[in-house]
Amino acid sequence: MSNSPNIVLGIESSCDETAAAVVSDGQNVHSSVVASQDALHEKYGGVIPEIASRAHVEAMVPVAQEAVEKSGFTKEDIEAAAVAHRPGLAGSLLIGLTFAKSFSLAMDIPLVGTDHLHAHLYASMLEHEITFPAVGLVVSGGHTALFLWKDILDITLIGSTIDDAAGEAFDKASSILGLGYPGGPYIERAAQQGDKARFDFPRTFIRDDTLKFSFSGIKTAVLYHCQGHSQGKGEIRDMDGQEINDIAASFQEAVTDVLAAKVQKAVHETGARSVAAGGGVVCNTRLREKISETCGVDVYFPSPVYCIDNAAMIAGLGCHLLQAGVKHDLFLDVDSEPVRMKPDKRIF
Ligand code: KG4
Ligand code: ZN
């Protein structure tokens, strides 16, 4: 990467984490700072966009400053700014994009916009050498998508959710069960004490011939189960700790069954030589186990700090984009549109 910018400041603000990182050579992480807003959104059981935007405004400059300080470089050493500009919450994305544009203008360095989901895949490359072609799975609070990843910058969407993201289902199930936010870690902890075979929650599309997902049905199934009847009305009934743990375990089993089955199908259909997964839900140990056991090829999972939203993945991918000659000007805009396949579109 000698002729293109090498020391890159990455900026991430697509949802409810304000993050900045300094990465060189696309792989050496000198600093990675993440300011989480979980405490602000906890009482609502989900991200409130306006609260998220305001918190990004407050955190962005100090977080970027801290990332530069911790990296051991000065701001004058930074050779480019990379920023997640899609997809995500428009107001949140705008804060990071505006900061990155301002920084690149003030320091007279190139600006490059990156796709947040591509960056979640790239997170695996911060720690592993990937064997291409790979199947890429991104599964987070806002997204559930499958990609054919032929080379670092050659990424094609091959499947996606038609409604909720898997992480969203974890968050909703956790809220119904009276556990905390974000739901994934709470569900995983409760599931460790639970019976995963006790309840049979829906595994939507698990055996159909597409690579699409749907997680709204399982969320409703958990809700109806906890209300004690199937009409969708009324209060959550009192449940003992064991039942809560069993629901968590049965829920986690159903969601991870579907994710692992679709990854296996994607590997089979594409002939991929490996699987790389990213996004907050990939912190889940049961999901990692199942994908490793069933997909039949090498698997790469980022460390948990690089699964959740972070800016090291943005800076790393940004290095490669810059190397490939991609640069953006100050007209770069945000694109909040979620990544979706058309519902019945088949790639193969
Ligand atoms: O990637 P991420 O930090 O943000 C988005 O881009 O959405 O992912 C956050 C999501 C949340 O829905 C959270 O519940 C889920 O990742 N998550 C988990 C676990 N840790 C975080 N889901 C399942 N098991 C976990 N251990
Ligand atoms: Zn994300």
Image (cartoon, rainbow, N blue to C red):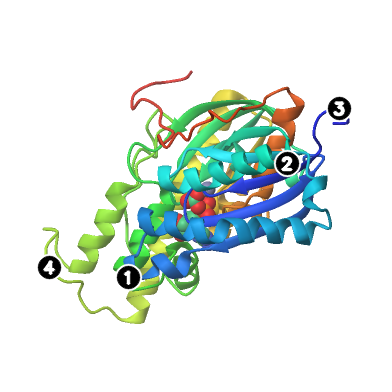
Q: Secondary structure at mark 1?
A: loop
Q: Label 1: few (<14), some or many (≥20) within 10 Å?
A: many
Q: Are discs 2 and 3 less than 8 Å apart at CB? A: no
Q: Which label lies toward us, 4 or 2?
A: 2
Mark 2 and mark 3: Cα distance apart in space: 19 Å
Taking the spot 50% from the left edge, 48% from the top edge, the residue there is 95
Left or right, 324 with respect to 244, comes to: right
Task: Choose the circle earlier in sequence order: 4 or 2.
Answer: 2
The residue that disc 1 covers is 177
Mark 2 and mark 1: Cα distance apart in space: 49 Å
Q: Label 2: few (<14), some or many (≥20) within 10 Å?
A: some
Q: Secondary structure at mark 2?
A: helix
Look at the picture and state if 148 lies above or below 276: above
Ligand 2 has an atom within 8 Å of the beta carbon of the residue at disc 2: no
Specify the quadrant of the image occupied by residue 240: bottom left
Ligand 1 has an atom within 8 Å of the beta carbon of the residue at disc 1: no
The residue that disc 4 covers is 234
- Given residues 22 and 279, the one toward you in this image is 22
| Disc number placed over residue 3 in the picture, else none | 3
